[in-house]
Amino acid sequence: MPPTDETAQVPQQDAPHGATPSRPPAGDGAVPGARMPRWLPRAMVLALALIAAFQLGSWAFHQVTGLLINILIAFFLALAIEPAVSRMAAHGMRRGLATFLVFLGLTIAVAGFVTVLGSILADQIIKMAEGFPSYLDSVINWINSTFHTELRRVDVQDSLVHSDWLRKYVQNSATGVLDVSAQVLGGLFQLLTIALFSFYFAADGPRLRRALCSVLPPARQTEVLRAWEIAVDKTGGYLYSRGLMALISGIAHYILLEALGIPYAPVLAVWVGLVSQFIPTIGTYFAGALPMLIAFTVDPWYALWVLIFVLVYQQFENYMLQPKLTARSVDIHPAVAFGSVIVGTALLGAVGALIAIPAVATLQAFLGAYVKRYDVTDDPRVQGHRTRGSVGLAARLRQLLRG
């Protein structure tokens, strides 16, 4: 038997008659003459279309974000006035007329309050402008007596009038007038948009609920109506808590302003109470600026006392008063209320801080109706106190020592 060679090649078998001999693959792995799959161009076109649709949707969403936020504010405002409108409609009044009367009352109250505050602020600015020379004389006399200088008011006024920074400030103010005007007009347009949508939401509330329920099965309709009712209750409770905190804040600041002898103490107290509670995040500091300004016209040290009181009261309100009142009126845990405000501020800014608590309270109440709960065992680890028959650690140690 001849020796076999391991490196010898196996002879190829002859192909059958009429069959095409197979070709070895090319060096790069591609099969010569292979065609592109038919699904590949269609898949590429579909992928490009999806990317273009995503980009277009993202651009459109960013363009209408402001409008969506205004609609969200209008919806919660409509929920806030829903009880008053429904009560008036229950007595036979049309919902459109009832909504108009509610908005008219709110507009008159806000306009009157702003008018009174504007007149007070203008009066105080005039008094400050008239008393500025005497303030300047007192400051110059203190500097001359302390540092043994010979400053005069005329020299100080001339240096201020002819200074470069004043000239630049006037130029920048003149160029910024158009920007301020545009911002004011934009703010007025946003207020008009919110008022218009909230009017329609409140006046056409039953029609809106009927249109929403018409596309849902009967079981889902009951859940939607229940969620709507919960949202109205929680929003009303939230406004009640904010109004109560505004009352407490106004009384506290009124006592301080009256003790210091600051003029217009009642109006300033109402200003601080309302603005600090219904303008989130910066409302407290914005509200405290006006009493500080008026207190400065009486005595500069009084302005410092007002600032200290505002800062201290803000901390007391944030960590003591607001969580407890919110937990009782809206029925959510103080930590949840505080965390919801932080999350709402991070997502939507001041608007998120304003609507975070009623939104979370509505969601919690709606989910609580469908979560099954059980009785908790009588255990000190969950009850927070020692139950009958429970033996403490010291008693157990005594038993062991006796044993």
Image (cartoon, rainbow, N blue to C red):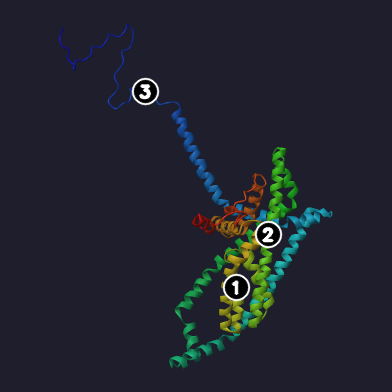
Image coordinates for residue 186, horizontal then vertical, percent: 60, 61
Marks 2/3 in contact by CB < 8 Å: the verdict is: no
- Residue for point 50% across, 38% down: 50
Residue furthest right in the image: 92
Discs 2, 1 touching: Cβ within 8 Å: no
Q: Residues within 10 Å of mark 1 (few under 14, many from 20)?
A: many
User: What amino acid is found at the position of numbered circle 3 in the picture?
Assistant: Ala
Residue position for label 1? 288
Can the viewer see residue 78? no
Going by the numbered disc 2, the residue's amino acid type is Ser
Q: Which residue is label 2 attached to?
A: 329
Residue 191, above or below 301: above
Mark 2 or 1, nearer chain start: 1
Which labelled disc corresponds to residue 34?
3
**Percent position (x, y) of residue 289?**
59, 74
Distance of label 2 from label 3 (alpha carbons)? 74 Å
